[in-house]
Image (spheres, rainbow, N blue to C red):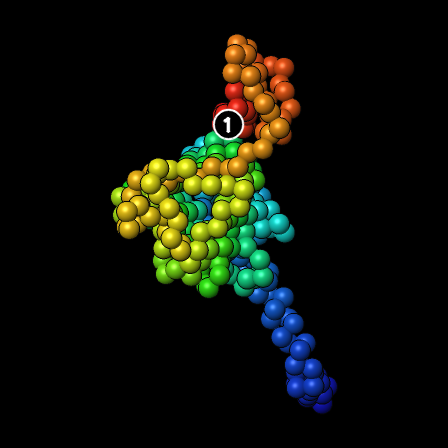
Amino acid sequence: MKTNKYLIIMFALSMLFLFPEFLSAKVMETDNDEHPQRYGIEIGGVEITSENYHDISAANGFSAIVGGEVYFEPEAKTLTLVNANISSQADHAIHIFSYNDTSRGYKIALKGENGMFSERKNALFATIDVEIFGDGIAYFASEADAAIFTDGSEGMQLKISDLATIYAKGKKGIYSSDEKEDFIVTNATVHAIGTQGSLFNFRKIVLENSHLTLPANGYIEGGSVMTRGAVCTLEVVIEPDISTGISPVKSNPDKSVYSIDGTKKDKDFNSLPSGVYVIDGKKIVK
């Protein structure tokens, strides 16, 4: 009997020495079972993980979400906001950071009108590439800090694209910590204002199919919007270069409504869904 016990113990020890990967595999399996997968994104200080991403709501612990809908697709690394209202006192409304997978950044898809507010921190704080896109609108506001703040590695990109419209208001509007990140606007609309600077301190600002419209005497120097040799603290507005193929007739009394691609709409403007339209040659966000 003792001989059998001795043989069993010796066999177990030999397995550990001869096949250490057997033990490590078991430990890894246990760790994966005990610890949920992290995605590197927080809403109001609550981290999205493999355990809770199916239900991102106040009822599931995301108390900062006070209205609308929020979804996260791990494979696409896309956070979708649908008429969402996110408000936080002590934390960033949305915090996107690098965790393990730094091969690609995140996307924020906008649908409808969305609002992100933080009383003490940033409405959006990102340390890895982020692209905000979609035909919706997002309002970012901070009472004590920057509305949108980036603090990433050299060459990080914050991109606004695909007809998205964002408004950023805080002590700093849209701000980079150390001139390492790029701010890119591609066929989108940006409004930014800050008492300490509206859009500034990036490595560079790149406008693609977009142009600076306000302030009237504003200009881009490096990674900042400037006025009279200083960082601009007035409202900064960037708008897309629209080419709809529409040649509006000024005397036309019916004010025909067109989609952004030039398709004429049969319905009255007030009955159309939210989106971007062209009336009398002017872009209107509904």
Q: Is residue 228 visible?
A: yes
Q: Amino acid at mark 1?
A: Lys
Q: Residue at x 41, y 51 (%)?
A: 125
Q: What residue sits right under mark 1 in the picture? A: 283
Percent of width and height locating residue 146: 34, 48
- Left/right placement of residue 268 relative to residue 181 reads right
Q: Residue at x 28, y 51 (%)?
A: 229
User: Does 51 sit above or below residue 192?
Assistant: below
User: Does 13 sit above or below residue 286?
Assistant: below
Secondary structure of residue under mark 1: strand
* Image quarter hosting the N terminus: bottom right
Question: In front: 45, or 59?
Answer: 45
Q: Residue at x 64, y 76 (%)?
A: 23
Q: Quadrant of residue 233?
A: top left
Percent of width and height locating residue 119: 31, 43
Question: In front: 249, or 107?
Answer: 249
Percent of width and height locating residue 58: 46, 38
Q: Residue at x 30, y 45 (%)?
A: 227
Q: Is residue 46 visible?
A: no
Question: In front: 14, or 168?
Answer: 168
User: Does 142 sit above or below residue 104?
Assistant: above
